[in-house]
Image (cartoon, rainbow, N blue to C red):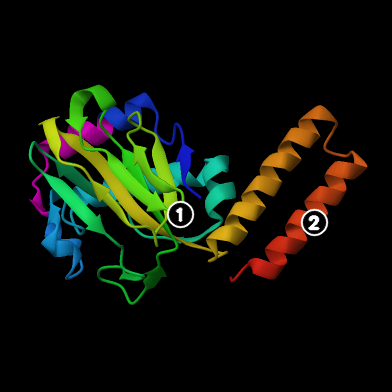
Amino acid sequence: MILHVPHVLDTQQVAHCREVMEQALWVDGRVTAGYQSAEVKDNRQLPEDSKEADELGTMIVAALERHPLFITAALPLRVFPPLFNRYDPGMAFGAHLDNAIRQITGTPYRVRTDLAVTLFLSQPDEYDDGELIVDDVYGAHTVKLPAGDMVLYPASSLHRVTPVTRGTRFASFFWIQSMVRDDSHRTQLFELDMAINQVSQALSQLHPAVVALTNCSHNLLRRYAEV
C-alpha cells in the first residue's frame, strides 16, 4: 500500500525545519547508503548525530504520534530516527532497495524496515522534477507532495528520485518497523478500520454492526501482530 499522509507538520513547523536545514552543514548522502545504493546515490544529508537532525527528528516523531491516519496505516512498533536530505540541481538517487535492517547509530538497537517514509519539506513549486518514483505490481507511482505531507510505502519497493533541475528539494526520510510485518495484512486492517469509521459516522459507535466489525478488526490484529 502506498499512502499519502497529509498535514504531518503544520506551516510553522515546516518553516522551522527549513530555517534549521538551510543553516546546517551537510555531508555526502552516501554515508547511509548500502554498497549497491551508494553507486546511484547523489545527494546531501544532515549528519545522523548532529544536533539539527536530533531536534527536527524529535519534532517529527512527536507529530507522528498525534496523527491518527499514520498510526492506523503503519501500526508502528519502532520508528527509525528521521534523517534529512537535500537535492540540489543535477542531484538524483537511482533505482534502489532499502536495507532490510537498519542499526540505530550509537545504540545496540536495530529496526526492521517494513515501511519507508518520505516527508516533504519543500513546496512542489520550489523545485522542478525531483519526484519520488515507487514501483509496485501496478507499475510506477510518481510522488511529489506539499511541504508537511508525507508518503508511506513498503520498504521492499524499488524506488528512486529523479534528477532535480531547478531549486532545492528538502525532505526527511526514515523507516518504520510495524507490529504487522506483512503489507497485505496491514492493508487489510487499514481498509477495515476506514470502513468502520464510515459505518460509525453513518450509524453510531455503539451500533451492533460497528461493535461486530470492531471486534473483527481487533481479532485480526491479535492474529497478525508481533509485539
Q: Residue 216 carries which label?
A: 2
Decide which of 15, 129 is in the foreground and name it.
Answer: 129
Farthest residue to the right: give it.
208
Residue 54 at what x, y percent from top left?
27, 52
Against 116, is 168 above or below? above
Label 2 close to label 1 by CB (< 8 Å): no
The answer to whether residue 116 is visible is yes
The residue at the point 26 percent across, 38 percent down is 131
- Residue type at mark 1: give it: Val
Of tags 2 and 1, which is closer to the observer?
1
Decide which of 148, 17 is in the foreground and name it.
Answer: 148
Identify the image quadrant of the C terminus.
bottom right
Decide which of 223, 55 is in the foreground and name it.
Answer: 223
Report which residue position mark 1 lands on: 137
The residue at the point 11 percent across, 44 percent down is 91
Whether residue 73 sits left or right of residue 121 in the image: it is right
The residue at the point 43 percent across, 51 percent down is 153
The main secondary structure of the magenta stretch is helix
Please state the total of marks drawn on the protein image: 2
Residue 88 at what x, y percent from top left?
10, 38
For label 1, count other residues whose C-alpha is less than 10 Å away and answer few (under 14), some (14-19) or many (20+).
few
| Residue 162 position by quadrant | top left
Asked if the magenta segment contains residue 171, the reply would be no
Whether residue 186 sits left or right of residue 81 in the image: it is right
